[in-house]
Image (cartoon, rainbow, N blue to C red):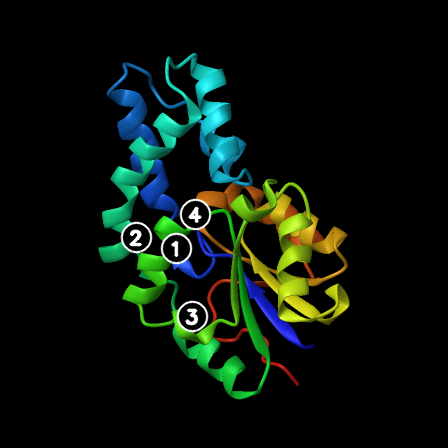
Amino acid sequence: MKAYIFDLDGTLLDSMGVWEQIDAEFLTKRGIEMPPDYISAVCALSFQETAAYTIERFGLPVSVDELLKAWNAMAVHAYGHTVALKPYAREFLTAVKERGVKLGIATSLPAALYEPSLRGHGIIEMFDVVCSTDEVGLGKSSPEVFLYTADKLGAAPKECVVFEDILQAIQSAKLAGMVVYGVFDEASKEQWAAIQKIADGVLYDFKDAPLPQ
């Protein structure tokens, strides 16, 4: 394999709880109780797709840009200061890098959020490319961001290993022809049984994650 591609939220970053808090606070301020299916409905969407979905679902009198600005203001501090790496993620990235395999990120986060987090943890220089769904205009229900990341890394899809925590994203990466490992996260635990069935392997943390041969 030539390249390892990682998701951020819920995979490398222990951050999904942050979004639940932000979404709940945002909706509560507007007198709306967050429905139990909301997080699962938006987890594979891009940032812009999530904003558009939220506006339509709750009839919010704001534009997508206005909603994105409000969310960004709430999230920037959390990503820069409080969001932790998943257990053994740093050690695993270092071990993969030492074996000469390229590292990439395929995330739904915009640069305003992923850059402070990656820099704060001192790992941004480990990655050869960092790609966002914003760059391709489609969320992870489409394989496009994975194909785009592979192309940037100079690797064919069959030469890539993907690490993801969301069922739809795992399905998309598999559709792209990549080897995919499901990473457990509390926010997507309801999908875990389905993830175990379709992923090429599953992980509860990166301690025993597969290293390049």
Q: Earlier in the sequence, mark 1 or mark 3?
A: 3
Label 1 SS:
helix
Which residue type carries mark 1?
Tyr
Residue 32 x, y percent position in the rendering: 33, 16
Give the residue pinned by disc 1: 114
Q: Earlier in the sequence, mark 3 or mark 2?
A: 2
The structure residue drawn at horizontal position 27% and vertical position 21%, both measured from the top left corner, is 28
Q: Which mark is residue 110?
A: 4
The structure residue drawn at horizontal position 44% and vertical position 20%, both measured from the top left corner, is 55
Residue 153 x, y percent position in the rendering: 63, 69
Which residue type carries mark 3?
Ala
Give the residue pinned by disc 2: 79
Q: Are marks 1 and 2 in contact (CB under 8 Å)?
A: yes
Q: Are marks 1 and 4 in contact (CB under 8 Å)?
A: yes
Which residue type carries mark 2?
Tyr
- Which is closer to the viewer, label 3 or label 2? 2
Label 2 SS:
helix
The answer to whether residue 149 is seen in the rendering is yes
Q: Earlier in the sequence, mark 4 or mark 2?
A: 2
